[in-house]
Image (spheres, rainbow, N blue to C red):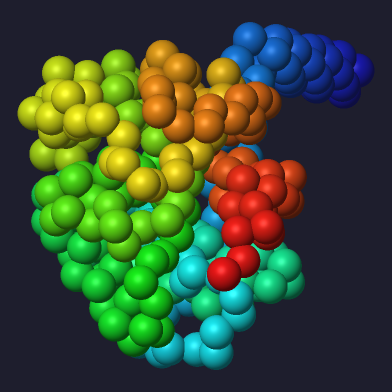
Amino acid sequence: MDEWRSIINKIGIAVIRTGVFISNKASENYRKIDPDVIRHLVQVPLLGYSFLVSRHEKINPGKPDGYPPLIFVHGLAGNRGQFLLMAGYLWLLGRKRSYKINFDSGQSVEDMAAALAHFIRGVRRATGEKQVEIIAHSLGGIVARLAISKYRLSSGVRTLITLGTPHHGTYHARYANTTIIRELRPDSKIIKFLDKQRWPKGVRGVTFWSRNDLFVLPAESAALNGTEKIDATPFTHYSYLIDPKSWAAVGRALDSRQRH
């Protein structure tokens, strides 16, 4: 009996030591992970609120609020619901008319640009306004620039604000081989086309960029010449959508003095 107790005690001690060893190794490996990677991963589930919003929205004219209508443009693998919180914050600042486009899966960047151009015209027609203002996240900024350039919409857009948009492409796009991801590579046809375009005349541009954005490499690719460049470090790629500091910064960038 004493022999069995001794064996069981040894097994128990071995199990405890193994558990401590594994725990220490896990903690050690956790500390080796770039903190920005952890921040990005933690923030992803927080975007779950975006699925509470329907995929498509009827464009209602709304009551004039003294500002141009706001159009939100989501990024890759996103949806219109991702702007729910930011739109709510800006609503409190007086921006009562906002519209969020939702792109269908499988659309190319050019398809998205055509859809956005149609959406912009629809908002202007419904509201009777000559100009709109656009807030675009990530890929949405490239789609917005392409729509404005290709469909000659510069006279109908007062302001374009981009949040973490890889305007000059991102080297991280080399790690995937889907059609849209390839279009985000620095040497893609669309990026080269946009690089040759000057910022649309008459459109006020604001580009937010951050050194902590893992999806834009180099980080400065999100800061575009011809625009007001805002260093949003230490925002992550998702901070733009869920961090109240981001909403406040966007509100300031829109500038309440632009009433008309």
Tell me if residue 228 comes above or below residue 219 in the rendering.
below
- Left or right of 223, for residue 96: right
Q: Residue at x 67, y 26 (%)?
A: 234
The image quarter containing residue 162 is top left
Residue 203 x %, y %:
38, 47
Residue lying furthest left: 189
Q: Position of residue 247 (x, y in %)?
A: 66, 52
Q: Percent x, y for residue 167?
A: 33, 29
User: Can residue 106 be seen in the rendering of this structure?
Assistant: no
Quadrant of residue 236 within the rendered picture = top right
Which residue is at the front of the view, 103 or 125? 125
Residue at position x 72%, y 67% in the image:
93
Check the picture and name the quadrant holding the C terminus.
Answer: bottom right
Q: Residue at x 11, y 39 (%)?
A: 179
From the top left corner, tell me how far across and down residue 57 is, in percent. 37, 81
- Quadrant into which the N terminus falls: top right
Residue at image position (45%, 25%) is 223
> In this orientation, does residue 231 appear?
yes
- Tell whether 43 sits left or right of 118: right
